[in-house]
Amino acid sequence: MDATWKAGLEDVIAARSAICRVDGEAGRLYYRGYEIGDLAAGVSFDDVTHLLWFGELPTASQQAEFAAGLEQARGLGPDIVALLRSLPPTCHPLDALRTAVSLAAARDPDVGSSEPDANLRKARRLMVLIPETVAAWQRIRTKREPVPSRRGGSHAAYFYYLLEGREPSPELARVLDVVLTLHADHEFNASTFAARVAVATLADLHAAIVSAIATLKGPRHGGANEDVLSMLLEIEDPARAEAFVESRLGARSGLSKHERANPKARMPGFGHRVYKVDDARARVLRGMAKSMAEATGRERLFEVAERLYDAMRARTTLPVNVDFFSAVVYDALGIPPDLCTSIFAVGRVAGWCAHALEQYADNRLIRPRADYTGLAPRPLNVAARV
Ligand SMILES: CC(C)(COP(=O)(O)OP(=O)(O)OC[C@H]1O[C@@H](n2cnc3c(N)ncnc32)[C@H](O)[C@@H]1OP(=O)(O)O)[C@@H](O)C(=O)NCCC(=O)NCCS
């Protein structure tokens, strides 16, 4: 057995995949061969989802068929609404979402089958269930009624409608659409990998998505998104950004490695396992954050982010990641910090499902080994136990 190991599986190739390519040296990202900036500029999130699942952008008739399939899945079940109403308002939105997906599994007519057709039907239902649940829980916990489902409109516009109870302007719908596209997939990130590990045991698709949502929550992954917005709001004044960076990074020099690993001793939104330079998504989001902040009068928060970014550039080589400027876009959209990671999930479920379908299609159990560092075999002397 090869006894070499890499902490955190860094740079380890865990499987083959034809969905997404990350070029960490150049800061580039491709879905099925298309560059992310080109997709964000010219293709809808609905079409990107089709691309991720089926390998190609849809033709006009495939587009209509795909939209009809998603539309058919619309409408949050009364059991999910009742479940959400039973949760304490302090329940984190991602925990509410994870719980709702578990309940949805219990009454899904295809839960017992992982045949390709059944999986596609479930993937469509999950694509819709996730934004519907995120929006319904946001309304319920803020003492508003969930908005009934409606027909028509893009996936992004439908989500906004459910969240706010009114149609978005075409510009707003487009912003949300691009945000979802930018978050739709990212190769073997932790939540997608968790989903693939679940699928590899031949657990069902809902089980895989529950694993993914649970894994997304941590501050090393999607949870950083809400930490960024909380941090920017806490700093509040652009003039304080530099001192904030100085104190956080400066304090690190006196800490042990274990203490330095605490998320409170790191700058959320910076650093990445694969990217060595700012990633392409962050570049698109930075431009969107600026124009959204100007359009909504939230320039001050954008300015805090810009000053923070400059201060980080001056002190470290850590690249900025997708969670940093997306937080400014969410703020401009009126999204509170603890809802940010749920918006991430609304986009990423497209990728989770694509990877799950790929894993089911050519599966082998994912079961690595540990490099054992414990005690050598030793005799058990029961009589000598005190
Ligand atoms: C994303 C992340 C988890 C990648 O981690 P990784 O590849 O495992 O890198 P490590 O955690 O081993 O970090 C390597 C070094 O860089 C430092 N580092 C990495 N990200 C940092 C950050 N955001 N702020 C300060 N220092 C950071 C680490 O402290 C470590 O230095 P140390 O050994 O002296 O303590 C990490 O960069 C991070 O925690 N970022 C902040 C959270 C975040 O934005 N997550 C979203 C990712 S899309």
Image (tube, rainbow, N blue to C red):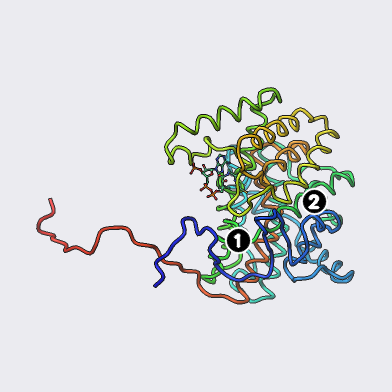
Mark 2 or mark 1, earlier in chain: 2
Q: Mark 2 points at which residue?
A: 178
Q: Determine which quarter of the picture holds residue 129.
A: bottom right
The amino acid sitting under disc 2 is: Val
**Residue type for callout 1:** Phe
Which numbered dot is residue 299? none
The residue shown at (65%, 69%) is: 109
The residue at 76%/45% (across/down) is 285
Judge whether 40 appears above or below 312 on screen: below
Label 1: element kind: loop
Mark 2 and ligand 1: say if the CB distance to the nearest ligand atom is below 8 Å: no
Residue 72 in the image: state x and y as whole percent.
79, 63
Image region (quadrant) for ligand 1: top right
Say left or right for 54 vs 202: right
Alpha carbon separation for disc pair 2 and 1: 21 Å
Residue found at x 48% / y 38%: 260
Residue 196: quarter of image? bottom right
Coordinates of residue 52 in the picture (x, y in percent): 73, 65
Closer to the camera in the image, 36 or 100: 36
Q: Is the N terminus in the top left, top right, bottom left or bottom right quadrant?
A: bottom left
Question: Badge 1 is on which residue?
Answer: 188
Disc 2 element: helix
On screen, residue 246 above or below 351 = above
Which of the pair 238/134 is nearer the observer?
Answer: 238
| Marks 2 & 1, CB-CB < 8 Å contact | no
Can residue 102 be seen by looking at this rendering?
no
Packing grade of label 2 (10 A; few <14, some 14-19, many >=20) is many
Mark 2 vs mark 1: in front? 1
The part of the image, by quadrant, that contains residue 154 is bottom right
What residue is shown at x 72% (from left), y 68% (from top)? 53
Q: Rate crowding at label 1 as few (under 14), some (14 to 19) or many (20 or more) other CA atoms within 10 Å.
A: many
Is residue 312 among the parts visible in the rendering? yes
